[in-house]
Image (spheres, coloured by chain):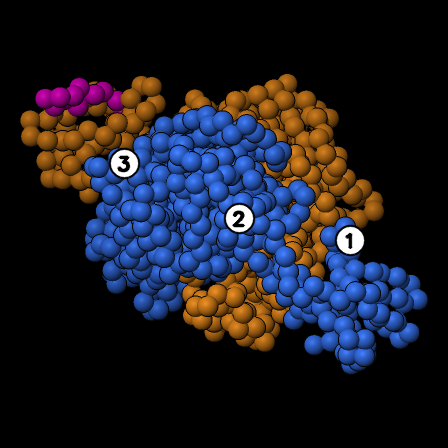
Chain colours: A blue, B orange
Amino acid sequence: MYSEPIARALESGGISSGDVVLFESEKQRVEGELMPKTEVGRPDTLVIKLGNGYNVGVRYAKGAKLKLVKKGTGVPKFPVADAKSKQGLPKVTLVYIGGTIGSKIDYKTGGVHMLIKPGELLYEVPELAEIANLEIKNPFSIDSADISYYEWQTVAKEVASAFGGGARGVVITMGTDAMHYTSAALSFMLKDLNGPVVITGAQRSSDRGSSDAFFNLKCAVKLAAESDIGEIGICMHRTSSDDECMLTRGTRARKMHTSRRDAFRPINDRPIAFVDEKLRIRYNSDYSKAVDRKEARTTSHTKFEPKVALIQSHPNFDPEIIDLYARKGYRGIIIEGTGLGNIPGSTQHKDMLWMSHLEGAMKKGIVIGMTSQCLYGRVNSNVYRLLRLISNLGVVYCEDMLPETALVKLSWLLGNHTPEEARRMLPVQIAREIKDRSETDEFLV
Amino acid sequence: MYSEPIARALESGGISSGDVVLFESEKQRVEGELMPKTEVGRPDTLVIKLGNGYNVGVRYAKGAKLKLVKKGTGVPKFPVADAKSKQGLPKVTLVYIGGTIGSKIDYKTGGVHMLIKPGELLYEVPELAEIANLEIKNPFSIDSADISYYEWQTVAKEVASAFGGGARGVVITMGTDAMHYTSAALSFMLKDLNGPVVITGAQRSSDRGSSDAFFNLKCAVKLAAESDIGEIGICMHRTSSDDECMLTRGTRARKMHTSRRDAFRPINDRPIAFVDEKLRIRYNSDYSKAVDRKEARTTSHTKFEPKVALIQSHPNFDPEIIDLYARKGYRGIIIEGTGLGNIPGSTQHKDMLWMSHLEGAMKKGIVIGMTSQCLYGRVNSNVYRLLRLISNLGVVYCEDMLPETALVKLSWLLGNHTPEEARRMLPVQIAREIKDRSETDEFLV
């Protein structure tokens, strides 16, 4: 809600958001498009978009004036290109589920407009029409941080249905926050991929000049259209310059920076492939090939048990927290242990001992997996006596699997298998989330 | 307990652990020192230490034979060197609190022998006598994963007392698992450092040829004896070769690999200094200088509130967990949000909405801080609408501070200040745990 003086000025001037206005106060003179009021803005402040695209907030204090310069058009315009791709290009299904990558701000409503018409998208990234015959789906739009297994189930079914409908590859665009949880979930939910499934997004809004959105998208569509990969991967910038993208395995990727364009890194793994400025694909490591659709069709297996906890072990941790999860009906716990997979286990401070709490949880049938908060490297219960005791108790050491991937995997396993089977399958490779041997060039890359 | 056949063979042969034995079965012939039985070993298996130092486990199956070759000496021998340092060398206090760095296996008992006599340590690392006049303290020994604020309080007091007693610098040796939590805790607990406080340890046991223990220790003692640094740092290998060590700021270090010797990395920061093979110190970035003891003496401020939780936000997280912490009397929560500091906040799945749970916790006086699970980069509540809402609610965005450092800092703040003061101080730099500007060369280094 605006303050009363502003509300009055708007009413008397016949001004509404979207109009071009001139604001004048003792200190400032600002002309531009009046942005809609947002719920978090101060009541005494107007937001005006300048000609250069930046927004400024101006305080409507005593003596300020607001004039209408020009009424807004009322309807936002998003230019549209001829949506025809070249004939004979591979069919790629683009599944939009949110994020800034395929969106523009609708200045009229302050909301986000999704570029879900092929023509709108092709206006922004005309090169796509040279690469693939795009089909665009938008089952829902969501802030990536809000995504849950409900959405994963929908996306997995979309992917299976796209391959069933003849797509050569699938591109999924979304926000980056929970992208690697999503790529891991799809890696377990989808079997017999008939083509590449490439997830992409942007760290910078596609309205900004420095945006990585369109280069990421071009590289992703290229991989989906032409590569013979049969895995789920994340395609984002390799470095902070706009000259190469990198495809990282879905079960091995992690967002390692809050804002850099090259935030997504492979952990305990090598990138699968690179795509350079000229959209040339270079394969970098071993990968699973797409399954010929004559042999098998892509299927989705989307059952999921959300009651799985992720607990980071640290000094002063109160292990009664484990009992709380048990009482809430949790069926799995992934521990992010210290070092090789350690927890406070032999301390003289009885209130910090984990062992009996873990034992109690396992007696209730809860499956417990051990990963490392170091992220890089491999848990190993054979090096120290205490770790052998933890392992002998029944805690499953998850090799070189990422904690987040282990969380998603255990949830998926408990949705589709008995706890005993889930326990047995947790440390065994299903979707390249675990490997026997670590390479020295996989640290901090 | 050994199986009956083994127990009988030992009794009839007059064999006990520490003796040299010859084991023969159909498949194997192994000679070496019989290791003590451990509680986790299989009952039908003997562990024999070979001449090369490696242990092998041999299965005592039907037809196996065990012969006494030579009785053990009964008493383990740890060689001792002349413990005299050169005259006029700076005094360095070495505080041993555990870890493999200053320990040897006592083959008689299977236990760990701490090299806490200067002569024993100088036998292993004679170069130390050329660098400093060492005083060794061993207030306790603990597995690093077991360390808690009780031990941190003891160590902080030891450090203050060492400087009070005229030490030029202090070296702390410990296990690596919770080393960076410990370095962060000491960084907040100690004020006016009269010299460098260097924490070191080993990723490989000092009994092994590939151990990093002694090079780390030499570099640490060198820094403590000669540098003018007035900060807590972690001194470990810079790369996986044995040719340079790196001093990483205590509030910025993180163990990033389960087993590599160069596991400790600076996050959102540059290393303070390097020490090369010839023990030459090279300063690499800005640091705080030691305080002249005429101006101020080092003091320790060790109060601590352990009831602070670390919660990683992820898809499918049940926010009722926040209520459980509130009911258990927690006074602080650090969230490891996704991306720029995000949580599931606007999803349509009501059971996954965090907002009302955070609000309830804050109404109870719980201080909540936001960090990023990306680790690298900076949280920022100004970029997205939802993040502004979270921040407006009262959640404190913790800039570029590591989640683990934020956990330790909030515990320390709540031990020494009112909740309102703690809330205000959480995002403000105290011990170089936060800085205004991020550099591009601080990512994955």
Residue A210 placement: quadrant = top right
Give coordinates of residue A384: x percent, y percent: 36, 39
Residue B229 counted in the magenta span:
no
Residue A291's label in the rendered image is 3
Q: Please, which residue is most extreme toward the right here? A: A26
Residue B445's label in the rendered image is none
Look at discs 1 and 2 and give the one toward the viewer.
Answer: 2
Residue A119's label in the rendered image is 2
**In the rendered image, which residue does mark 1 sit on?**
A51
Residue at the spot 45% in from the left edge and 30% down from the top edge: A273
Please name whichever residue, A375 or B135, is drawn nearer the observer in this view of the structure. Answer: A375
* Distance between the alpha carbons at the discs numbered 3 and 1: 51 Å
Residue B29 placement: quadrant = top left
Give coordinates of residue A354: x percent, y percent: 38, 56
Chain letter of mark 1 equals A
Above or below, A291 against A64 in this view is above
Chain letter of mark 2 equals A
Look at discs 3 and 1 and give the one toward the viewer.
Answer: 1
Under circle 1, the secondary element is loop
